[in-house]
Amino acid sequence: MVRIAAGWSQKRIAENMDIDEKTLRKYFSRELEMGATFVDGVMLDVLMRKVREGHTPSIRQLQDRLREAGPTAPRRGPRSTDEDIDEDEKPTPLGKKELERLEAQKVPDNYGDIFDRLKSRGTH
């Protein structure tokens, strides 16, 4: 995986491992396909661990990486307005059953303690 992430060719990796290219593809297809992503994820995990320890250079490096990721990276923050969303990206309106289900989950404002309601009935 590290060799793929470093840009090595399959031929070069196979030669380094002293195996045939077909054997490499047969037994290491996942590593060849996802190696760069996996290695990048491991590096981010190490970086995050250093950030939690308060390592200032790591904090700056992680901030830079997140900035480079750009707007495609999911982030919490202010929600976009309808003006920020293209017509094609607007959410699909909810159907009648979905709206009824959501409405049923809301607690009414006049919902109170059961004992208050029993008192208003005039218990005997």
Image: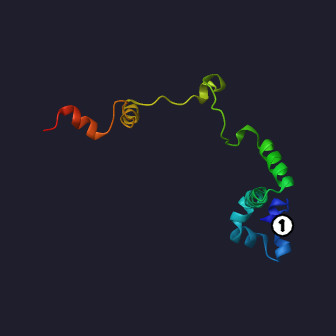
Say left or right for 77 vs 110: right
Question: Residue 36's quadrant in the figure?
Answer: bottom right
Q: Which residue is mark 1?
A: 11
Say left or right for 107 vs 2: left
SS class, disc 1: helix
Q: Amino acid at mark 1?
A: Lys
- State the colouring used for the structure image: rainbow
Q: Quadrant of the N terminus?
A: bottom right
Say left or right for 90 vs 119: right
Q: Position of residue 67 (x, y in %)?
A: 79, 42
Look at the picture and state if 16 lies above or below 94: below
Q: Position of residue 20 (x, y in %)?
A: 79, 74
Q: Position of residue 46 (x, y in %)?
A: 77, 61
Look at the picture and state if 109 lies above or below 124: above
Say left or right for 53 vs 103: right
Furthest-top residue in this view: 83
Q: Residue at x 86, y 67 (%)?
A: 12
Q: Which residue is at the front of the view, 60 or 39?
A: 60
Q: Residue at x 63, y 27 (%)?
A: 85
Q: Residue at x 62, y 25 (%)?
A: 81
